[in-house]
Image: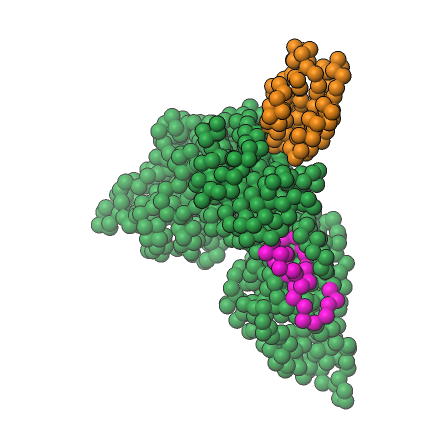
Chain colours: A orange, B green
Amino acid sequence: MKILAITACPTGIAHTYMAAEQLERTGKQLGHTIKVETQGAMGIENRLTEADVAGADALILASDLPVQGRERFVSLARILEVPVQQAIKNPAEIFARLLG
Amino acid sequence: MEYAFAFPLAGGLHAWPAAALRERAMAHQARFEFVNERTGRNAPMSSVLELLATDTRLGDPCRILVEDGDEAEARLDLIAFLSGPFLACDRSQAPAKHLSTVVPRLVERSGGRWWAGTGVSEGIGTGQAVFANAPSAPREPQTVPGEPRPEAELQSLHRAIEGLRTQLQGDIQLAANLAQRSVLEVHLALLEDTGWKACMAAAILEDRLTASAAVAVALRGAAEALHRSDQQVIRERVLDLQDVADRLIRQISGEDPEASHLHLTEPSVLVADTLAPSRFLALDRGLLRGLVLAEGGATSHTAILARSFGIPCVTDLRLALPVGQRLLVDGRRGLVIAEPPPEVEAYYRIETEGHHQRAEHQAPAIDGHLTTRDGHPVHILANISTVEEATYAFGHGAEGIGLFRTEMLFLHRSAPPTEDEQFETYVRILKEAAGRPVVLRLLDVGGDKPLSYLPLPQEANPFLGRRGVRWYPGHRDLVRTQVRAALCAAVHGDLRLMVPMISEVEELHWVRALVQEAARELTAAGKRFSGGVPLGIMVEVPAAALNLEALAQAADFLCVGTNDLVQYLFAADRSDTSLMKASHEWHPATLRLLERIAEGGRRAGKPVSLCGEMASRPKLLPLLLGLGFDDVSVAPSAVGAVRAGFASLDAGACRELAHQALLASTSSEVEHLLENTFEPVGALPLLDPELVVLGADCGTKEEVIKLLVERLATAGRTRDSLGLEEAIWAREATYATGLGFGFAVPHCKSPTVIANAIAILRLPTPIAWGPEATARLVFLLVSRADAEEEHLRAFARLARRLMDPDFRQSLLDAPDREHLLDLLRPESAT
């Protein structure tokens, strides 16, 4: 499956990237294609494009604050919002909930 | 005759300046009356108490009336005093800087008893609580039983005053530091107070009281007058007054002065309502670990003494405690903790060690050449008046004497010093200098610094009158004698001559001719002298700065005197604080003039240095360096701090800052630049072996964060360790930073951070990290509010890599900190 994710945390110097890394690792292990956008202290990186959204099946928002550009994903049916901590501590569970 | 002025001291007319005024006035036959126009109160200057009772504050319009005796000379002497040494009376009064009241989390969490008061002397100390009784209350007046013998009582009073005077004078001689001496001098001045003495005598002769009762009555009257003041610093003098009265009463009754002393037998924290300065001084300071007082603010003399001896002190606390408790005194935050648990003591131990390390770390080595961080050479010299100051300055790293003020040799005497006398002093200073340069400023006197043996016509505005070089033509012989003494002394070292108050090239030609004439006389007399003494000028008149090209051609070197230059540039009398603002020093007009001088000197190939208050202000050092002043001369006491300040600067960044400051249009714009866009510490690497702690003995999260913050402070990554600690805890409050596999990544982005860093601590066994997680390896990431992308990227990279179990294991297995740091470097990432 093709899965998108956005990670963001208030300070934007650690949790954003740890969560992104966990989601990427776990997604690959589970055999998915995954792309994660980070919204941290360096701004938006690895931005999710229209083409990404068009080909995607689901979106994970691992964030403790409102993500930027949420209107990009109105067409997606499956969106799961979780605290950023959960993406770091228990990423497998997030995928299970998203796809279960 | 009278002299009107705005009161210049920020602390008001408190005891030290009052005692200094009195002393200066007593040296003259004239009578002085001090008048405060705002409060409408007058005081004879012979009475410190009455001076205090005028309740004088900064900026109050004041007048001093001078009558009889040597009134003309006395008035001039007083003016010189008020615009010079008097301004220094305020300084050591300043309370300890930035005391925080944040209660450490560990203390709050420990559940023990603690109290918050006001910290007035920094430091941390632990000891057994010892309770001091309040000093004996003023005794009730008693009439003499039986036949009243007022004369005998008066005699006994005078004997007691005499005895206490001898004691105080002896104590002053033995004083361990300046604060102690100043406090004792105030006590001596109070003892000698004419108003108080008259009041005591009247109580004996007219009211027929005993000597002791008379002291108590006079004390009550004087104390009431001081209590009426709305300035705490004056109300606090009541403690001094009680102290002197108490000692006087004990003298009268023949009590052993030792009898009231407290004897400490183990490390102790003294708890008292108040503590008289003399009782503080009588304590065994080797065993005194802290003071807890109910009364007496930051400017009470006991607090000042505590600071000068490094004894932590908390006031505004009235503790009721059982005997035998252990107390920890935190003078920085103003806390007292009863029976501190081990982890609280450990926390404070970490803080204390951090402070000690920084004290050692931050003093740059005093030998060898000083450079900025980017290798630009700088020279810090000292401004002195006496041989003692020269000794002190060289002991603290001065590379020479940039300004030797010779006026001290000429003031307060009935005739000018002879050539031999001057020669001897100059040689002593050159010997102290041992080959380092000594810039001797030729006599700088005039209407503002009068000499009693050379009466001058009174000038309407002495600062614009015959000062410095303008005074020389009328006193040619005096100046020639000084030049001769200097030329002979120059054989013994690197002596240079500097001419004050130059505004025109002809003035310098005149002095050069005088130097040549002196040399011819010395040759004729067959005396040994040096013919090649460089002759430089003080640049302190704006006209000189604007005609610098011509003057730089004629002079061998230039030295900017910023105090006068700024005063003349803004046409603002520097003794009038309502006109003269410190911000004039960083006003764009001043900066442009300074840049012009530095540039003019450079173009003419003549060395330019700078002496004046400006160079002693740490925040202005980046500007001065950026403008091209890498050679400055400061007060001996500032040499160490200015050396440390320059050593931490980046000359390239300073030039950029100065460039921007020159484009500003107001002082506040420059101030904004200084505070916001520039930090003297430039880019430091994120990783630093000093920031890696392996095998630390920490039992709590609080201790771990404290330890890492102290390391960051010692490594120069923050100047506000308490503020940074708070910022990290604020971040922790939003959510815990434990990652759940024995790793924790506390972090924060905060203006308290000067340079970004990663601090690392590895524990032998995991500790609790919040309610759920544990931690064995802690990475503390601290970032400036405007961190560079490169560093943010490094933080992000580390955060991502910590998600890799193999990487985490290798961090836990790394045998030492070098291996650990190697693992973290970008090139090791796959």
Residue B743, by quadrant, is top right
Q: Name the residue at 71% across, 82% down.
A: B150
Magenta stretch: give its range.
B319-347
Q: Front-most of B131 and B544? A: B131
Q: Name the residue at 44% across, 40% down.
A: B819
Q: Position of residue B738 (x, y in %)?
A: 64, 40
Residue B182 falls inside the magenta stretch: no
Q: Front-most of A58 and B824? A: A58
Q: Name the residue at 75% across, 54% down.
A: B230
B567 versus B658 height, above or below: below
Residue B205 in view of the camera: no
B491 versus B545 height, above or below: below
Q: Front-most of B19 and B111? A: B111
Q: Position of residue A2 (x, y in %)?
A: 65, 17
Disc tally is 0
Q: Name the residue at 75% across, 67% down.
A: B320
B361 versus B162 height, above or below: above
Q: Front-most of B393 and B189? A: B393
Q: Position of residue B470 (x, y in %)?
A: 45, 39
Residue B789, by quadrant, is top right
Residue B331 falls inside the magenta stretch: yes
Q: Farthest residue toward the bottom?
A: B146
Q: Position of residue B531 (x, y in %)?
A: 26, 42
Residue B806 in view of the camera: yes
